[in-house]
Amino acid sequence: MDLSRILRTIPDFPKPGINFIDITPLLKDYNAFRETVSLLIATVADRGITAVAGIESRGFIFGGAVALELGVGFIPIRKPGKLPAATFSQSYDLEYGTDTIEIHTDALGPGDRVLIVDDLLATGGTMQAAAKLVEQTGASVEKIAFVVELGFLNGREKLTGYDVTSLVTF
């Protein structure tokens, strides 16, 4: 199945000059969604994954489904102030400013082998911060997987040293 044909591009969203890759057509198509989850799972065959982490918010959709299929727990990585217990925080640069994401300090620990999932790799800053958070817990990042990669933004460069896979690259 060619997942790129199911994704939709929305021009000038959220602002002029940006072409937004919309995953909602893929999500509403059971077969395409099922295939996406299966392909993400295939990237970690025989890797001994003990947990799947997903980045708020679209990473929750794919990461949660992958975790269920793998039979492991799901770990949310969220924006500040959204997690109720003690957290580790990691800030990262945006085009205009910075942002921060958090993980519970007790979400993972030494011996955990983590797959981090998100919908889209653009500039790589968010995923780089997520990987650092996972490592702060003592866990290891075994794999990073995306549904879509915008290759022309070179986000993969920020993820050097990690095993990174994308299902569709534009």
Image (spheres, helix red, strand yellow):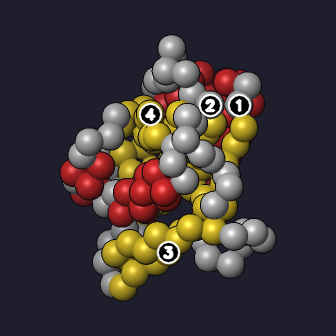
**Residue designated by label 4:** 142
Q: Which residue is at the far right?
A: 84
Check disc 4 and give the amino acid type: Glu
* C-alpha distance separating marks 4 and 3: 23 Å
Check disc 2 and give the amino acid type: Thr
Which callout, 2 or 4, points at the residue further toward the start of the chain? 2
- Can residue 54 be seen from the camera position used here? yes
**Which residue is pictured at 44% across the width and 33% down the height?**
142
Q: Answer with left or right where residue 21 lies relative to residue 37.
A: left
Check disc 1 and give the amino acid type: Val
**Which residue is pictured at 55% across the width and 21% down the height?**
48
**Picture coordinates of residue 151 (x, y %)?**
26, 47
**Residue designated by label 1:** 72
Q: Do the residues labelled 1 and 2 touch (CB within 8 Å)?
A: yes
Q: Is mark 3 on a helix, strand or loop?
A: strand
* C-alpha distance separating marks 2 and 3: 25 Å
Q: In which quarter of the image is the C terminus?
A: top left
Check disc 3 and give the amino acid type: Thr
**Picture coordinates of residue 61 (x, y %)?**
67, 46
